Structures are given as C-alpha cells and as structure tokens.
Image (cartoon, grey):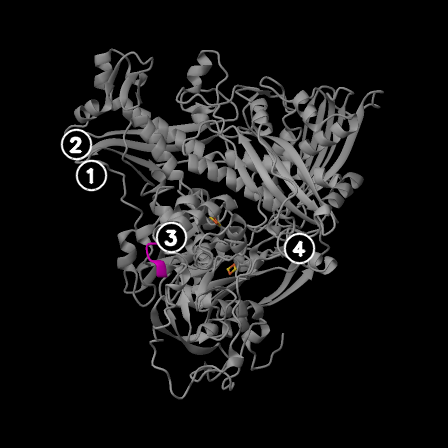
C-alpha cells in the first residue's frame, strides 16, 4: 500500500471519488480537505421532492445511493436494503414515477426529481391491503418494493394477466413465499381498484402531479447539473 | 384495560428499562426511539402484515440508532488458510470519520481457517468510510496449503491412516451389512455418486445488527459503560446472547438482546455481524449498525460439494429392494462439530421411506478450510430424499418396472424398521398422500401460447419442438425426535382473569415472535384450551423467569406451544375446580369445547358464558406455569415427551413436480409442483400454507441455482446464460405454480399421548406436531430432481442441478 501523504481512502477502495471544483458538479459541492491528513468524502446538497414534500439534503456524498439518502439521511426506511447490488428489488422506489432500484441509483440522480417511497401511501392503499392479506405470513422484507412495482403495473395495465404479473415482479426476489400469493394479491388489488373506479391512474397519483411545482426556489446561478452528470436511472427489468 | 397489578411478573410490551433513557448523556448517545414497536407482538393477525406492506415493520436495519450512530464494515480473508503475520490499523484510524478499527487478535482471530473468515472490522460515520478504513488496514497473510476438497481429505486420511481431519463417523446396519455379494441372476444393482453443493445464500434480506451502548454515571461525575442493547434477528435469544457475551468478553447480564423480525428464511443473523457491532459499540460508546452485504454471503468453494453420497441399491426381478449400501462424506468446513447433527440425520434417513432388510450406512464428517457447514437449511431430509428417490428411479429403470410401481412396492409402513433399528410408529399416511397427488391432472403441454410460460421465459425462448417435459414423484420422510436427543424444554405462564370486557388470558412465553406468527399460534393454543377469545401474548421482563433450553431446528414452536397448552390447562383446572366438584369429577377431566365446559366423556356440560362470570368474579386471577420437555430416551411422564424406546416418529409428504427442459437452449423451467402433506394438525391454516410455500420456494431455489462463484464462470463459458441457467435464482416468472392439496390431518386433537399409550395406541406427537416446511423442502427438491431426470432422460447426480455441465 502506498505511503503517499495524499492517500485517498476512497481511491483505494475502488469507490467513486471526485476532486474539488470539478466543473460538472453542482455548485455547493464541498470537498472537505482537513489541514492535515487524507481527503474525505466530496459532498453536494441535493434538492428533490420526496413523497410530495420538497426536501434539501445537505452534504450528500457524490457516490451515495438514493437508497442510502432515503433511509439514513431522511429516515424513510420503507425501502429496504436487500442486496445492495441490484438483484433483489427490495429497494425499489419511484423516481419521477418510474420504479428504480434505490441501491443502484445515485442520489445525485434525484436532484430536481420527484421521489416516491412506500411511505407516500401512509397506512396503506388497496395494494398494501391486498399484499398484507395474501403475503403477510412471509417476513415482509420484500413487500414495500413489490408494492411499488404493483402500483406501477396496475397504472399501466389495470387487469394484468398472471404472466404479466409474474413478469412485472420478476425483478423482485421474495425469499419466503412462492408467486401464488403475490398473483392473488395483485388480482385483488386490481379488482378493488376497478370497483372503486380507480382504473389506471395509480402510480402517478403521488408526487407526480405535473401541475405541482417543484417547491424549491430555483438558484438563478445554478440551473442544475448539466446533462452529462446525470446518470441514467436503473430501471427494474426482468432478468433472463 | 389490563390489570397489570394483579399479575406480578408481567411487563407491558418490551420497553427499554427506564434508566436507559435517563442515564444516557445526550451528547454521547441519545435515547433510541425504537422501543414502542419492539418486539413484534402480533403474529399473523392484521397489524403485522399491514405494517410489513406499509414499510413500517421494524427490522433491525430500520431501527434508529440515534445521532452519532456509526456504520460497521467487515473485512474477510481472501485466503482459506493462512497465518496472520502483521496487522497494522494505524493508517485506517487516521481517516477522518473512522472511529474504531479492530483486527486479528482483537477479534479473537490469530489464523485464518476458511475463506471469508472475518479478520478486521471498522466503524465509521459513513459506510464508505468504514470500507475505506478496512482497505487501509495492512494485513500480511502467510497463506498455507488449503484443504478444500472433502473427498481428497477423506481419501488421504484413509490412505495414511491419519484421521486427524475426520471428526465424526457413524455406521448403521440392518441385517448382515458388509460388502454386497455378487448379484443373483434376476437381480439388478444401481450405483451412483451424488454431490450436493452449498446453495448460495439468496441475495435478498441479508440481516443487520444494531448495538446500542447503555451508559450511566460512575458516581464521580463521569460516565461508565453499563451494558449493551443488541438488536438482532434471533429465535433463541438466550443462546445467542451468551455466544455474543463470550465473544466480546462482557458478562451476559450486561447485554440485552432485543429480538428483531427475521428477514428471509435464514435462522437468524450472522454471528460475525453481532460480534462486530457489539465490539465496536463497546469500543466507541456509540451505537453501531452492522449490515450484511454481498461479501457476507459465504458460499463454499464451488468445486467442492459439501455432501457426497455414494449409494448402491439392489432390487430383484419383482422390484423388491433387497439391499442398500451407502457411504457418505460431509464437509464440515472449519467447524466440523456443527455438521454432526447433519451427519446423524442423514445416515438414519438416507434410505428414504422404503423398507429394506439388508442395509449398511457409513458416514464421515471431515474438517476442511471451507466455511463452517453450519446448520444445513432444512436439515438432512432434503439430501436423503433426493438420493433415495433418484436411486429408486434408477432401480426401476434397471429392473424394467415403473418408478411408481417400485415406490408402492417398497413403501415403508408403520412398524417397519429404519436403518438405525428404530421401528416406525404413529401414522405414516404415504399411500393416502400418493393417491391424492396421482388424482390431480397434469398441466397442459406444450406450454404457451404466451412465451412467458416457456422454459427460458422472455428472451430465451427456443423452439417448441425442442422442449421436453418431465414429471417426477417423490416421497419424503422427516425424522422428528432423534434417538440421541438430549433434553430440550420450554416453559410458559398463563393467567386467566377478566376485565370490564369479560374474560382475558395473559400468556407469557420465552418464544420470540420472529414476525412469522409464532405468537398467533400460542394465542390459538390458549384460546382452544380456555375458550377465551382475548389472549395477550408477551415475553417475560426478565428472560430468566421463563427458562428454556436450546431447542433444535423445527422443534421450537412445538415445545413452546406445548408449554403454553399445559399452563393453560393447569389454569383451567384451577378455575373450573368448583364446577368439577358440582359434576363430581376431577378438574383435570374437564375440557372446553364449542363454548361449553364438558366432562372428558362429554356427558355433563355447562356454557362457558355462565361459568366464567362466576369463577372470575372479584378480579380473580388463576395463574399457572407450564413446562414441556422432550428427551431422546428415558422415562415418559406428563409434561415429558419421550418416544418409546426404539421407536421413531416421522412426518411425510408426497410431491409431484413437472419440469420443462429446452434441450437446445439448455434452460429448465419448473412448471408445477403438486404437494400433499400430512400436517398432523393445522392450527393456523395461513401459517401452515406459508410454511409449505416457503419450503417449496427454498427447494426450487436450491435445485435450480448454483453457487455464487459460478455465476461468472457460467457467464463466460456459455456466453451469458439465460433464465434458470446455472448461477441465477429463479425469479417470480420462473417459479413453478404450487398446487397445494388439502392437508391431511393425521393427529387426533386434544388427546394426550400418555393417555393414548395407556390404552395401547401408538401415540402421535403431542399437539399433532409435524414440521411442514422441512418435509416440503425435502419432497419438493427430490421431485424437481426426478422430473428433470425424466425430461432429460439422463441421471444428473449433482445438486444444485447442472445437467449440461
Ligand atoms: S437492495 Fe437488492 S436490488 Fe437494491
Ligand atoms: S416475504 Fe420474506 S422476502 Fe418476501
């Protein structure tokens, strides 16, 4: 291991680190450099709308995942950390209405976006009620993420077939229950929605109202990160 | 409202001791905020499932440690076998935000015994800093020659006669034993070697541990560390607490283990995580959270299966099983003692539910540099079922008979002998289960038209002409009370009382509700014994008030339910003493059935609604303790279950699996699993169904999965393998449909087994206990293997399956 005085702890870990003043980082990026000793984490503030509330999270490390910021900085523990590497879908949240894997989505990608977590549904809607009724005997770790995928599915396909249900949930690994209870739950939620005339608007009803303005005063000097610093959202896609 | 004052020893919920909040200095460790929901008090009611779906269920990873909480990270050895030469944590500690780094001897590690052994831990303000700190720890290893292949180790030990690495040996014979003679003219012999890899741990739900130090005044204006709260998923808090206390060198009394809900189907959190969080919290006086990550999933070495079984079966022309010889080697990894229960169970059950008069089984555990074998999920029943069913299929082919034919012909019955000489007692309803399965229809073939029903599902769909279907039937048998079982026991306390809303029952148990409805079961048991709807289940304020022993896998629920049942009946006898006097019978002979207090023979009765208001008048409380013990041998007595000497109780299941194979693209798809099980007695249907579902899921994952290391290998060799190729977990799209047939309930309800025995019947286990999940896992895995064999017309001998190499 090198004895160089400017030893960068994140450099050796293979993690993602940036130098202070990189032009593409939003203004306000702080790269703490203690008087002596190694460099620490480069941080930026992030502003977004989470479950309808505008929030500003100061000092987010540029390589922090959206999941980490939601869970550890905002205390929204509904999205779970299952594998941390995109395999299990426990961390699914909606970013601008699209399901993404929170563990693989950089927190920076949420800058200026609408984030929806399971907490947006409070004590629950017809989807969580159906999941609770059919899948409550498992450990429940996968349910919040599955719930968000189900809401997205029902928004697009109000009456999905069994294959469609299974396919749309195939980005989730449930370790406790076979698919049967999930298929039943989705069917029930779909019927409840139909009965209450909800139809296909589900996933877009929280935090995605286009008329709602992003309630953070825009910084005139800083129009937001240029496109290059945006990282494509990691969508939940079925494997295979 | 409850009347806590009337019930000394009960605690409302499981709040932190008051002193925790008061004594904790705000600047160091603010009072944690988790107490309100801890532990999950409701089983499968409505509250817990709703909380799970709403993301409000408090897993250990979700509990707030409070400001100042640190994140722990673990460094694991890249070598399976090495000495630690030099350890330097200085540079790691220089990183700002890193609060503690412990390595090597500070963790009690002086040499590396297996790949992935934890050699250093760090706590920092951000997980990335903790990982960076570990990267900055300088560790110099002196790698030694690792012994990774159990077969080589075993062969070397046999060759040299040095059995230092062989830690256990078992041998069971029925009949003559010894080498098989030359087969007779009409006899056929089938001989196969089977290999079982360690299934990779499924990615989801890695577990997490939160350690919160409890500090207080030292009396001189300073602070001292009083103890530690440890939040972790644990089904046996007493045992886990002692293990942690020993590892970190604190007295067990200073640690409070706060059970957290389970995640996935694992049996509790990784001990490494617990020790890391606890040590770092003690060192830093700050809350520390350790979360499992991908690196903490220890899959063994891909090339070296954990269990090898060499089986020889001989059948005559009629298909009667005339002789069985089995030799098996279990790789115990770095902790061979932990693999001995597996060896025991496997040796006793590897012949499966078939009768044979000439059997010899030999088994060994060897010590290697693989990760400790630990408890095999679901025990040895799965391995036994896969081997026995594969051998029966092979024998059927060899003697030119149908596989079903051979099964029926050799089926074990109550009264038959197992390889260890025990006789089967109780009901063994395999014929009924088998008929049930055979009466169902097969799924339509070919699959389609939706391509998502093809093997390979989306994107990996081949030509229909290359899809072959296989079906396999498998029977499984799970041993319930092993003959050498030491004493296991559980205790409980039940209080029958009333409040303004009528009768009320308090149950105190040391069983943890891990979020899977254990307490709901206890409520059900108490409700049934006492005929009271409102039952409150709690754990004791002080765990020592309700002692229980370590309980083996699959028996915990049974023992605790029985303890509650006995306590409830004792409380009932107290409460009904007056009625009994009126009826002129002993209070023990009164039961409560369908809202009536009835005598045992049902001749005299009185409505509960009349009885309870009388006996519970004036805040009367009837408190009784209950205890239930299980022994492998010894004298049975009320409250102690001992199988009659030389007898065995088993749980049985019959499964059919249908698997489609795309022989061109090399993909497999389990289409349907049909399950018939003896459930003994179903107390909570949703729980029973979930148990079977989880067993089936685990079996599918295991059979169609490869070990973590092989993912890359498969990808490289095969150019990115598709769905259900090696190295991937079946997704929801590829999981089979589960057709769960109505449970068979062979148990006879409330009758005491001692009572039955006195009348000369072979008794079922009290409470109709049968471990559903283990039987499901075993039978399903075996059926899937048989079906794949049928589809491919080959005899794959390795699990997880890798039929194409
Ligand atoms: S945590 Fe498993 S996919 Fe994100
Ligand atoms: S319910 Fe446990 S992972 Fe899905």
Reply above or below: B393 against B38.
above
Residue B3 tag number: 1
Are the residues under badges 1 and 3 in a single subunit? no
Q: Verify CB contact (< 8 Å) between mark 1 and mark 3.
A: no
Write the residue at 69% across / 45% down.
B661
Query: Neighbour class for label 2 at 10 Å: few (<14), some, many (≥20)?
Result: few
Q: Nearer the viewer, mark 3 or mark 4?
A: 3
Q: Is residue A126 magenta?
A: yes
Nearest the eye: A19 or A5: A19
Q: CA distance from mark 4 to mark 1?
A: 64 Å
Write the residue at 71% across / 31% down.
B393
Query: Neighbour class for label 4 at 10 Å: few (<14), some, many (≥20)?
Result: some
Mark 3: which secondary structure? helix
Q: Earlier in the sequence, mark 2 or mark 1?
A: 1
Image position, residue B172 (x, y; %): 67, 26
Q: Is mark 1 within 8 Å of ligand 2?
A: no
Is residue B742 visible in the rendered image? The answer is yes
Residue A193 tag number: 3
Nearest the eye: B419 or B322: B322
Reply above or below: B150 against B475.
below
Residue B69 picture quarter: bottom left
Q: Which residue is mark 2?
A: B619
The chain to which mark 2 is attached is B
Task: Write the start and end of the magenta stretch as one range.
Answer: A120-128
Mark 2: which secondary structure? loop
Query: Neighbour class for label 1 at 10 Å: few (<14), some, many (≥20)?
Result: some
The chain to which mark 4 is attached is B
Q: Nearer the viewer, mark 2 or mark 4?
A: 4
């Amino acid at each position: 291991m090198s004895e160089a005085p400017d030893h960068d702890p994140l450099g050796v870990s293979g993690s993602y680190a940036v130098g202070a003043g990189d032009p593409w980082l939003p203004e306000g990026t702080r790269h703490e450099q203690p008087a002596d000793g190694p460099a620490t984490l480069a941080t930026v503030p992030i502003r977004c709308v989470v479950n309808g509330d505008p929030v500003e999270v100061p000092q987010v490390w540029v390589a922090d995942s959206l999941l980490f910021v939601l869970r550890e900085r905002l205390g929204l523990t509904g999205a779970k950390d299952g594998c941390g590497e995109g395999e299990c879908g426990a961390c699914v949240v909606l970013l601008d209405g699209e399901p993404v894997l929170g563990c693989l989505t950089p927190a920076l990608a949420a800058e200026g976006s609408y984030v929806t977590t399971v907490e947006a549904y409070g004590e629950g809607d017809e989807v969580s009620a159906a999941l609770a009724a059919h899948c409550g005997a498992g450990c429940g770790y996968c349910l919040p993420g599955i719930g968000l995928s189900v809401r997205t599915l029902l928004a697009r396909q109000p009456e999905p077939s069994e294959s469609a249900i299974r396919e749309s949930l195939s980005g989730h690994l449930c370790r406790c229950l076979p698919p049967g209870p999930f298929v039943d739950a989705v069917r029930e939620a779909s019927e409840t929605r139909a009965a209450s005339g909800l139809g296909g608007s589900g996933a877009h009803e929280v935090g995605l109202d286009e008329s709602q303005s992003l309630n953070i005063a825009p910084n005139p000097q800083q129009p937001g990160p240029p496109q290059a610093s945006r990282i494509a959202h990691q969508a939940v896609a079925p494997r295979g | 409202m409850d009347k806590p004052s009337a019930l000394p020893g009960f605690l409302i919920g499981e709040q932190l001791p008051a002193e925790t909040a008061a004594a904790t200095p705000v600047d160091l460790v603010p009072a944690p905020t988790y107490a309100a929901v801890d532990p999950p008090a409701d089983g499968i009611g409505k509250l817990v499932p709703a909380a799970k779906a709403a993301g409000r269920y408090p897993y250990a990873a979700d509990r707030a440690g409070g400001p100042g909480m640190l994140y722990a990270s673990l460094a694991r050895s890249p070598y399976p076998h090495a000495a630690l030469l030099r350890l330097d944590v200085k540079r790691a500690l220089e990183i700002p935000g890193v609060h503690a780094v412990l390595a090597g001897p500070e963790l009690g590690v002086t040499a590396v015994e297996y790949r992935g052994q934890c050699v250093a831990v760090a706590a920092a303000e951000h997980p990335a800093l903790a990982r960076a700190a570990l990267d900055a720890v300088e560790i110099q290893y002196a790698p030694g020659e690792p012994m990774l292949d159990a077969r080589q180790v075993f062969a070397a030990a046999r060759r040299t006669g040095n059995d230092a690495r062989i830690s256990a040996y078992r041998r069971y014979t029925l009949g003559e034993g010894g080498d098989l003679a030359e087969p007779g003219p009409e006899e056929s012999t089938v001989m196969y070697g089977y290999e079982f890899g360690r299934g990779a741990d499924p990615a989801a739900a890695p577990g997490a541990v939160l350690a919160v130090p409890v500090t207080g005044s030292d009396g001189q204006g300073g602070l001292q560390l009083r103890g530690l709260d440890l939040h972790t998923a644990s089904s046996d808090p007493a045992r886990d607490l002692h293990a942690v206390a020993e590892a970190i060198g604190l007295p067990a009394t200073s640690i409070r283990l706060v059970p957290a809900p389970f995640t996935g189907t694992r049996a509790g959190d990784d001990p490494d995580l617990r020790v890391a969080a606890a040590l770092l919290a003690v060192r830093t006086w700050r809350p520390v959270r350790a979360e499992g990550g991908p690196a903490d999933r220890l899959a063994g070495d891909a090339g070296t299966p954990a269990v090898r079984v060499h089986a020889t079966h001989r059948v005559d022309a009629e298909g009667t099983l005339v002789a069985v010889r089995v030799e098996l080697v279990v790789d115990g990894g770095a902790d061979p003692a932990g693999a001995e229960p597996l060896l025991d169970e496997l040796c006793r059950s590897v012949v499966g539910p078939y009768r044979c008069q000439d059997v010899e089984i030999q088994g060994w555990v060897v010590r290697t540099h693989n990760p400790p074998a630990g408890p095999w999920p679901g025990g040895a029943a799965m391995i036994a079922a896969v081997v026995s069913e594969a051998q029966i299929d092979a024998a059927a082919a060899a003697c030119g008979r149908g596989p079903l034919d051979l099964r029926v012909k050799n089926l074990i019955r109550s009264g038959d002998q197992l390889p260890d000489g025990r006789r089967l007692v109780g009901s063994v309803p395999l014929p009924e289960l088998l008929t049930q399965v055979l009466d169902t229809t097969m799924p339509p073939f070919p699959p389609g038209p939706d391509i998502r029903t093809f093997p390979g599902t989306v994107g990996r769909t081949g030509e229909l002409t290359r899809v072959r279907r296989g079906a396999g039937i498998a029977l499984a048998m799970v041993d319930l009370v092993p003959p050498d079982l030491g004493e296991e026991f559980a205790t409980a306390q039940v209080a029958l009382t009333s409040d303004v809303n009528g009768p009320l029952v308090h149950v105190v148990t040391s069983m943890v509700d891990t979020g899977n409805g254990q307490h709901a079961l206890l409520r059900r048991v108490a409700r049934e014994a006492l005929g009271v709807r409102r039952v409150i289940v709690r754990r004791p304020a002080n765990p020592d008030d309700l002692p229980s022993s370590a309980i083996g896998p699959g028996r915990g629920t049974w023992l605790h339910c029985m303890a509650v049942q006995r306590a409830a009946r004792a409380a009932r006898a107290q409460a009904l003493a007056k009625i009994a006097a009126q009826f002129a019978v002993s209070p023990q002979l009164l039961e409560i059935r369908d809202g009536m207090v009835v005598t045992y023979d049902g001749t005299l009765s009185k409505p509960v609604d009349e009885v309870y208001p009388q006996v519970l008048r004036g805040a009367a409380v009837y408190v009784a303790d209950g205890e239930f013990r299980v022994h492998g041998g010894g004298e049975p007595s009320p409250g102690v279950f001992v199988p009659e000497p030389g007898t065995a109780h088993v749980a049985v299941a019959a499964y059919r699996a249908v698997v489609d194979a795309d022989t061109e693209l090399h993909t497999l798809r389990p289409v349907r699993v049909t399950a018939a099980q003896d459930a003994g007695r179903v107390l909570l249907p949703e729980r029973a169904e979930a148990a079977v579902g989880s067993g089936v899921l685990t079996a599918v994952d295991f059979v169609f999965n490869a070990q973590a290391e092989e993912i890359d290998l498969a990808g490289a060799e095969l150019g990115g393998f598709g769905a259900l190729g090696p190295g991937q977990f079946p997704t929801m799209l590829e999981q089979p449909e589960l057709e769960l047939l109505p449970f068979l309930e062979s148990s006879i309800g409330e009758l005491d087994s001692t009572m039955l025995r006195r009348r000369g019947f072979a008794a079922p286990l009290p409470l109709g206990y049968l471990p559903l999940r283990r039987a499901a896992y075993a039978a399903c895995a075996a059926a899937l293997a048989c079906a794949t064999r049928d589809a491919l017309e080959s005899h794959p001998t390795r699990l997880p399956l890798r039929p194409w190499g």
